[in-house]
Amino acid sequence: MLDFNRRILDQETSKAHNTSRTLRRFADYFRKYWFALVLTLMFILVQAWTTVFVPKLIGQAIDCYVTISNPQSINNCWYTDVDPNWTTEARIDGVLGISLRLLALFILGAITQGLTFYSMRWAGQNVLKNIRHDLMRHVHRLSIGYFARSEAGDVMSRVTNDVDTVNQMFNFALINVMRGTFVIIFIMFTMFGENVAYALISLSVAPVMILMTIYFSNQARKAFRRARREIGSVNADLQESISGAREVQAFNREDESIAQFQRSNEANRAANVQAAVFTSALNPMLEAMGFLALGIVALAGGLSVLNNEPLLGTSVVSLGMIFAFIGYVQQLNQPIAQIAIMWTNVQSGIAGGERIFDLLDDAPDIVDKPNAQPMPPIEGRVEFDDVWAEYVSGEPVLRGVGLKAEVGQIIAIVGPTGAGKTTIINLLPRFYDVTRGAVRIDGIDVRDVQADTLRQQIGIVLQDTFLFSESVMENIRYGSLNASDEDVIQAAKTVAAHDFIERLPNGYNTVLGERGSGLSQGQRQLIAIARVALMDPRILILDEATSSVDTRTERIIQAAFERLLAGRTSFVIAHRLSTIRNADQVLMLMDGEIIERGTHQSLLAQHGAYYDLYTSQFRDEESEVSANGRRESEPQPTGD
């Protein structure tokens, strides 16, 4: 399955992705913080201006105060009125004045740089907070079917790793790319304003640098996107290995698990190395081109000055202009290289954003109708009217199921694996929707009401109990968040969980390990039952809730169930005989259809499919129970 998923991911990586769409989605989040973005843009413009103005002032210092005897220098001096007869002291004062202005520019650039990062980070962190909030809310709105189709590790990767790449883009990369872009624009405008021919010569290497930047950044973007996807597979393998550690060790499959993780880890390493190759190769190549550009500037300008000849029919270049253009080219090379490096981070952040928005755009399978009303208080009448259901289109799991349950009845559902038992109970709280027919509670189609108001009146106890890494008190209170401590304790007493909870190290304040580790299966089940008892639902669903415990523990849990079931409409997926004998209806499923229905005794008397299931699965168990004197045995079925 993982190899298949990776092939799909590789196919997706090779497709074109809509960067502009992702940026528009980010813009929607930033709209609320537009003032911070305006300030950031203003600070970036000031930084770019100071960066460009520094070489210009240096050139003016040379032309106005150092080489003032050169007529061309006087012509290029715009900073002040030049007097060739100035004394040395006057020239020194002029240079000091420009030096102070340069110092002021450096200070202004440093202050605006700090303010730029602060304002952008403030806006970016608020946006990331909102994105994380939307992700968490959306993940909880997604249907159960989504989590059956998707790996938990990949979802976690989108919420953690992809959000982290977006965070890096907002904090550093995007600012540096924007600042570098404005610096390039300002420098080119200034250079062409001073001397068009000299600017063209100085920028002759720039097209090559730009083409190199485009090629390497595109290749790095693909590699970074592949790396983002591969880390999702790494997380999926890791999560699966940790969650299934007991099974891995029980079947002595440590080597196979390590090998599977190694394949995922190797694919992730290869993607990251490939991205690093393109990223690391670009910077030294751009530096080499930058040195070539400096040589061209110095050579062309030096020949013009030494020969006192104009460049390509324009004016003669002054010494100050040479120093200014060297500064321009140096300032130009730096943002080109910076953009090349940071743009890969921006692209990685955009790729992460695409995966985040893909998750946010994954519509839940189960949504409320526009006019859905809250579910009124449930009495407990349930009807399945010619219900068909399927998980994969064209492959029905239930076929024309029909049943009626009156208030307070116990409906037992039995059948072989894959018969559709769990599907029936999944339709009641609308974890899935029917494809044909209707499920009605108190005469109301469950599709016509708000799902949350429906589910809060249905209690579910599953075979695989999930407990949170919180105290016992909070785990039980999960059934009703507004319940008092006294209500929690009373619910625990109702299901006979109070005594063992009191014996825990800190009683109800004992913090449980992951998934309730440290407790026995029966203790975890009793806490889950107490949680449902606190919820006080009118409809109760038990999905093989005692199948994983021993017979003695089952007796305790069954006694808790008997108290909990009283007066409630209950649907029980039966694994053991104890939950079948007293059921008002027993439904025998086979291949998604109810083939037999009735009470336990009436079905045994029919000698049909239920009789065969009972004799093959339940008879030995009940005989053992009777032999131990733990429960009164039923009359054994006869061949009459």
Image (cartoon, grey):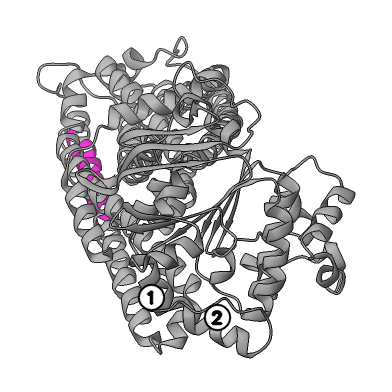
State the image coordinates of residue 47 (x, y, percent, origin top left): 49, 27
- Label 2 CA crowd tier, 10 Å (few <14, some 14–19, many 20+): many
For marks 1 and 2, give the CA distance: 20 Å
Q: Earlier in the sequence, mark 1 or mark 2?
A: 2
Q: Residue at x 84, y 62 (%)?
A: 509
Question: Disc number at residue 640?
Answer: 1
Q: Is residue 27 above or below residue 177?
A: above
Q: Compare residues 322 and 342 and report the one nearer the observer.
A: 342
Q: Where does the magenta region start and end?
A: 281-300
User: Which quadrant is the N terminus positioned in?
Assistant: bottom left
User: Callout 1, which amino acid?
Assistant: Asp
For this rendering, which residue is in front, 542 or 394? 542
**Residue for point 61% across, 90% down:** 627
Give me the disc on residue 235: none
Q: Secondary structure at mark 1?
A: loop
Q: Is residue 634 above or below residue 417?
A: below
Report the mark closest to the observer, 1 or 2: 1
In-front residue for pair 398/619: 619
Query: For residue 590: magenta?
Result: no
Q: Residue at x 51, y 27 (%)?
A: 443
Residue named by callout 2: 622
| Residue 502 spot, x, y in % from top left | 87, 69
Chief secondary structure of the magenta portion: helix
**In the image, 215: left or right of 370?**
left
